[in-house]
Amino acid sequence: MLAPDGQTPRNRAKAAEGRLGSARGLNIYGQPRLVGNDSAPASEGFGGRALAVEDVADVVVIGGGIVGCSIAFEVAGRHPDRSVFLLERGPYLGDGTSTRNSYVLHAGIYYPEDSLKARFCVAGNRALAEFCTRYRIAWQRTGKLVFARMPAEIPVLEALWRQAERNGVEGTEILEAKEMAAKEPHIRGVAALFVPSTAVFDVAQWFRVMEALLYDRAVVVLKRTPVVGLDRKGEFVEVATRNRGCVLARSVVNAAGLHADEVANWLGNVYRIYPVRGDYFSLTDRVSSLVGRAVYPCPGSLGLGIHLTRLWDGTVLVGPDARYVQSKEDYRPPDVLTPDSDLDTGSPEFLKFFLPVKEFFPVVEAKDFRLAHCGIRPCLRAPGEEGFRDFRIEPDPNVPQVIHLLGIDSPGLTASPEIAKHVAQRIDEVLSG
Ligand SMILES: Cc1cc2nc3c(=O)[nH]c(=O)nc-3n(C[C@H](O)[C@H](O)[C@H](O)COP(=O)(O)OP(=O)(O)OC[C@H]3O[C@@H](n4cnc5c(N)ncnc54)[C@H](O)[C@@H]3O)c2cc1C
């Protein structure tokens, strides 16, 4: 198949890889590392025309985040003869949570063994690192330290170490204060859990490469195409879009992230996703050079705590916090700016970040903080609810050829290749059943 510019899809993918931008992205609040490709090579072949009833797709994926893209890529790779449509409402792939996070390949130490989160995270960490190496996407295995501030926290580290062992996370070890200081001399703590497999990767590059690969696999990628309804039509599902008509699908994957509950509820379900926002600051070069890896306090009842993440380009992120919000779309800056748009270092919102970091990283000063970005987690846990919530990946109870993915919060980025394999298997069962 020739692309409109006369190149083969494979050459096109190679060319796109060569055009990859610098690791440091634009610094617009809420969208710090813009993918910025809103005229996709992937949808050119479709000519911008409306979908029509004669467009019968084997698989329609709703949502072009890391999960939806990975699923479309996996399905098209397994069965080149199957028609796969990827419908994204935003102007570019990765318009949702996938480009607004910590960019970490988590190791998988926090989740109960045999949960989807534990299994997919441990395997996804390896798979995504291999993918990044193969397609020359910037990534780095920085490792991570979870430190105890006082001896009373050491049993928490030991419990985490045991959980890591049960989950099959390799190479974790407890460090005494001296060993910890050798790795992170500027971090205050009495002991630490060292997790070597934690890594970071450039998500914006991942999306640029992925878009070219989807094109290579003949996936029809339609951006600026919000799906507005699902309706069972015999053995098919009619997928209605706001602006491009309808497509009949033999199977549908609901990978709409924060909006996956709304999509699922069109079929009569009553799912609910709670948006939980997290904000980030970054540190100036003066102090970011003093941090070698991801540095987390011991997890407590309030979650993972404000932590530091060193990225592949040397940027150090501070955050995120976690707070339930009303809006799934509101990425405006938090209440930390003066009327002149300077950082108000006396504001309670700022001190929430600064004070805990100052305690374990004493050389840092308020002047070292810059407002960075924010993201919104699609959580299944209601406000006030306790306990662990796993990913929910399940066929619709009434229309089983629709597979819903709900509550794909952290470690969804890391888990994405394994989620994709799991869903592709389910689709195989639907289409051969
Ligand atoms: C603050 C924060 C930090 C995090 N840090 C990490 C981390 O370091 N490591 C990690 O592994 N995970 C992390 N996560 C979790 C990770 O970002 C998510 O699990 C992952 O991005 C989910 O991907 P997704 O494709 O399911 O969702 P999204 O990226 O949100 O994609 C869903 C897509 O669906 C589209 N869509 C929605 N409705 C429709 C519709 N009706 N029609 C068409 N398209 C639609 C949206 O525009 C969006 O592009 C973090 C999350 C947050 C918020």
Image: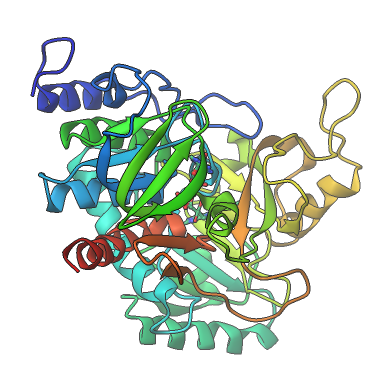
Q: Is residue 36 visible?
A: yes
Residue 419, percent from left and from top: 34, 62
Location of residue 371 by image quarter:
top right
Residue 224, percent from left and from top: 48, 27
Q: Is residue 411 visible?
A: no
**Number of numbered markers:** 0
Q: Is residue 34 above or below residue 310?
A: above
The residue at 91%/42% (across/down) is 346
Q: Is residue 177 above or below residue 220?
A: below
Residue at the far front in the pictured view: 234
Quarter containing the N terminus: top left
Report whether 49 appears left or right of 90.
left
Residue 360, percent from left and from top: 69, 62
Report whether 56 appears left or right of 334.
left
Name the foreground residue: 12 vs 414.
Answer: 12
The residue at 44%/36% (across/down) is 88
Name the foreground residue: 304 vs 187.
Answer: 304
Residue at the far top in the pictured view: 5
Residue 363, percent from left and from top: 70, 49
Q: Is residue 139 above or below residue 192?
A: above
Report whether 59 appears left or right of 374.
left
Q: Is residue 314 above or below residue 294?
A: above
Location of residue 385 by image quarter:
bottom right
